[in-house]
Amino acid sequence: TVALARRVGVTELPDIKIFHFGRPRDYQAGADALDLIDVARWNAGALMQRLPTSKVFEIEGADGLQDALARHQLLLVAFTTRWCSRCLKLASEFDQASTLLSAADPPVALATLNLDVPVNAALAERFGVYSFPIGKYFFRKRFIGAFTGGSHAHEIVSEMLTIRNNLLNADKDERDGKEEL
C-alpha cells in the first residue's frame, strides 16, 4: 500500500484521489458524505456516453435552440445537469425513446440542454426551469408547455405521440374551420 500511495502521489493521510481513465487527480472539495457523493455524480455524468442508437442531440444556447426548432416540427427538450442522479437515469431512457420517436411518422425529436453550460442559463430562466430534469416541448417553432409524462422510455414515447397527435389534429381542425368560411 505504501508503494501505491507513492505511485499516485499521496503525501499525507487522509488523502483522496479521483481516477479519471486511470490517472489520479487531487480531490479538492468538501469531505463530508454529501460532498463526496456530489463529486462522484459529477464525474459519472462527465463520463456518460449516449447509446449508439440514440437520436438525442445536445442544444447549446439560444442559437442552438433556434436551429433545432427550425429543423424539427415537434421537439422535446430535457433541461438537465451532468451531476444530477435523476438526470443520469433519464439519459438512457431518453436515448431509447429517441430511437422510437425518430422513426414515428411524423417524427418527434428529443434533445438535451445541459444547465451546467453557462450560455444555457438564459434559456433556463426564459422557460422557467427551477428544478431538473424537466422537459419542455415545442411545436412549429413555438413553446407549447411542460412535459408532464413519465421518465421511462415507454412513457416518454406514449406521451409525446399523444401530444403530437393532439397538436396535429388541432392544427387540422383549425385549417378545416378556415376553409369552411
Image (cartoon, grey):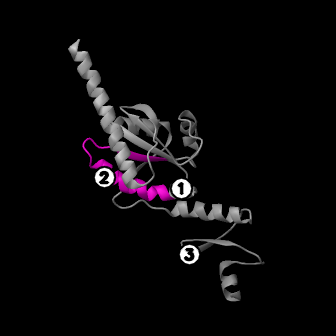
Residue 93: say if magenta: yes
Q: Earlier in the sequence, mark 2 or mark 3?
A: 3
Disc 3: which residue: 22
Is residue 55 something one can see in this rendering?
A: no
Which quadrant of the structure image shows residue 149?
Answer: top left
Quarter of the image where the N terminus is located: bottom right
As shown in the figure, which amino acid type bears the numbered disc 3? Gly
Q: CA distance from mark 2 to mark 3?
A: 36 Å
- Nearest to the eye among marks 2 and 3: give it: 2
Magenta-drawn segment: 89-113
Task: Specify whether residue 98 is in view.
Answer: yes
Determine crowd level at label 2: few under 14, some 14-19, many 20+ residues with C-alpha closer than 10 A: some
- Residue 152, how many percent across, how many down? 42, 55
Q: Amino acid at mark 2?
A: Leu
Query: Within 10 angstroms of label 3, few (less than 14), some, or many (20 or more) residues?
Result: few
**Left or right, 9 with reference to 112:** right
Question: As drawn, which residue projects farthest toward the right?
Answer: 12
Spot occupied by residue 46 in the image (x, y as percentages of width and height): 54, 60
Name the residue type under label 1: Arg
Residue denoted by label 1 = 86
* Position of 39 relative to 99 (above/below): below
Q: Report which residue position mark 2 lands on.
A: 100
Q: Are marks 2 and 3 in contact (CB under 8 Å)?
A: no
